[in-house]
Image (spheres, rainbow, N blue to C red):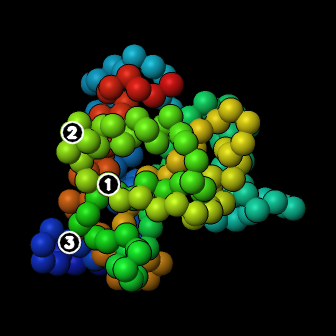
Amino acid sequence: FWPDLSELANDRWAGHALGLKTECGVLLSIAAELSRMKPSQEVVLGWMAQTKFPARGSRSALGAMRAKRQLLPQEVLILDIAAADRGEKSPALGKGPVLVQGKETTSKLKDRIEAITREKNIPVQSVTGTESTLMTPFSGDSTEVLILALPVKFPHTPVEVVDFKDVRALKDLVLNLIGSGRVK
């Protein structure tokens, strides 16, 4: 596909694989900010390859399994995309990033994220009950895992649409979470 990028009305953009490309841009921007912030705790930013391919005999993404094995994280915040504007219960463009939980449980990480969204007035949407092959390797034992997803209209098509209000909110939320010292 030709790497066209189309500017739409209301701070929205469209293009091929724009959701994942935007996520990479957000991570790079966060990495640049972290070099200036000097957070009080260790923060590891990782890009996972082979995220959509399950490992042999498993329903887990191979890249996520490798990350779990090598990093042994206490908390994992995965940045991903979420299909938007697909009906009444679906996330919507322009309403903030989507906090995704595999099942309805209490989570200290979720509580900290929600506290920051209230304190800093950052919009966020929530979805529960969505399983992801990215979450599976990190689930269980003592690791807390959540997904913060960028809402994307028409995902996995040449005309993915993102709203840059959501992009800015996602970046602000992650930076505030790290900067608050509320990440283990």
Label pair 3/1, CB-CB below 8 angstroms:
no
Q: Residue at x 31, y 71 (%)?
A: 92
Give the quadrant of the N terminus: bottom left
How far apart are the alpha carbons under marks 2 and 1? Answer: 11 Å
Q: Secondary structure at mark 3?
A: strand
Q: Residue at x 26, y 63 (%)?
A: 95
The foreground one among 59 and 121 is 121
- Tell me the crowding category of disc 1: few under 14, some 14 to 19, or many 20 or more residues within 10 angstroms, Cα based: many
* Position above or below: 184 against 112: above
Can the viewer see residue 160 in this picture? Answer: no
Number of callouts: 3
Percent coordinates x, y for residue 14 in the rendering = 28, 76
How far apart are the alpha carbons under marks 3 and 1? Answer: 18 Å
**Residue that badge 3 annotates:** 12
What type is the residue that disc 1 sits on? Val
The foreground one among 26 and 152 is 152
The foreground one among 145 and 81 is 145
- Tell me the crowding category of disc 2: few under 14, some 14 to 19, or many 20 or more residues within 10 angstroms, Cα based: few
Q: Secondary structure at mark 2?
A: loop
What type is the residue that disc 3 sits on? Arg
Q: Residue at x 50, y 34 (%)?
A: 108
**Residue that badge 1 annotates:** 124
**Residue that badge 2 annotates:** 120
Would residue 40 appear left or right of 49 to someone viewing this image? left
How far apart are the alpha carbons under marks 2 and 3? Answer: 23 Å
